[in-house]
Image (spheres, rainbow, N blue to C red):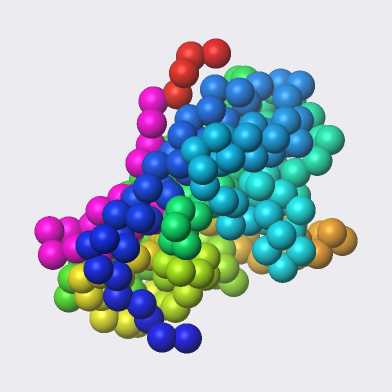
Amino acid sequence: MAIGIKNPREIERMRAAGDVVAICHQRVEAAIGPGVTTADLDTLVRDTIREHGAVSNFFGHQGFQGYICASINDEIVHGVPGPRALQDGDIISVDIGAIVEGWHSDSAWTYGVGVIGEDARRLLIDAEASLLKGIEEARVGNRTGAIGHAVESSLAPLRYGIIREYGGHGIGRQMWEEPHIANFGEASGGVLLRAGMVLAIEPMVTLGGEATRVLDDNWTIVTRDGSLAAHFEHTVAITADGPLILTPRLVSVVH
């Protein structure tokens, strides 16, 4: 698949989709708490996407039956929403995507439920920081390897596990496009970054090892050792003026 270069109008359509995703996350963050089910969060996102005239890029994709991916504790990515209720001390990654006028945006964030442990709190802080370090390197003239190298350099000294089987990707007319964005590697490796490229950058980080397995639902990916996992993702445009986040974080409404 060719690597897409978007013009300013196309990036604005992706920004519009990213704004819908951002509003979804704002509402999800406000709704999360003990006793809330992942199906409740899925319904909230479904209704928000429809309210804003957008379309989900998750629901129906390769048969996936959810408007979000909801991945709890040792679940890394692609968790299927359902009747499971959140408990105090859980962490949950919520991955959301939307389409506006045929253009996609995608963002994931990991949230604490109630009062979480200190190890989980540090995991969330450090995993989010690694995302921002990766985004800093999403600049014209760098290579995709610079993004992964920045993520790895942020996390490896802290002895976190970095998931290697999955990573980020290009995004545009399709949710998953070239190039692949690894969360490790050499800064000099990979594809040259040019203005107009749009990437979904998404570190996946664990408190244990990097090995994974897929559950019987054929979607949910978990840590093989049962350790906690965090997942953070932004859709980012490469511009002449530097990286532009198309899925901004909005301040959550207080519970």
| Residue 85 sits in quarter | top right
User: In the rendered image, which quarter is residue 11 located in?
Assistant: bottom left
User: On the picture, is 156 further left or further right than 237?
Assistant: right
Region of the chain picked out in magenta, as a range: 230-251
Q: Quadrant of residue 41?
A: top right
Quadrant of the rendering where the C terminus is positioned? top right
Q: Residue at x 46, y 53 (%)?
A: 100
Residue lying at 46% horizontally and 41% vertically, measured from the top left: 20
Magenta segment: does it hold 223? Answer: no
- Decide if residue 82 is on the left or right side of residue 97: right
Q: Name the residue rendered at 46%, 34% in the picture.
A: 23
Q: Which of the two residues, 245 or 189, is positioned nearer the viewer here?
A: 245
Residue 130 on image: x %, y %: 38, 51
Task: Report whether 200 appears left or right of 45.
Answer: left
Residue 235 counted in the magenta span: yes
Work out which residue is located at the far right of the displayed protein and give it.
216
Residue shown at 46%/18% (left/top)?
Answer: 253
Q: Is residue 67 above or below residue 60?
A: above
Asked whether residue 146 is in view, the answer is no
Residue 105 lies, in percent from the top left, at 45, 55
Is 138 in front, or is 25?
A: 25
Farthest left residue?
241
**Residue 252, above or below 248:** above
Q: Residue furthest bottom?
A: 1
| Image coords of residue 109 (percent x, y) | 51, 42
- Whether residue 81 is visible here, answered yes or no, is yes
Image position of 172 with respect to 110: above or below: below
118 or 33, which is in the foreground?
33
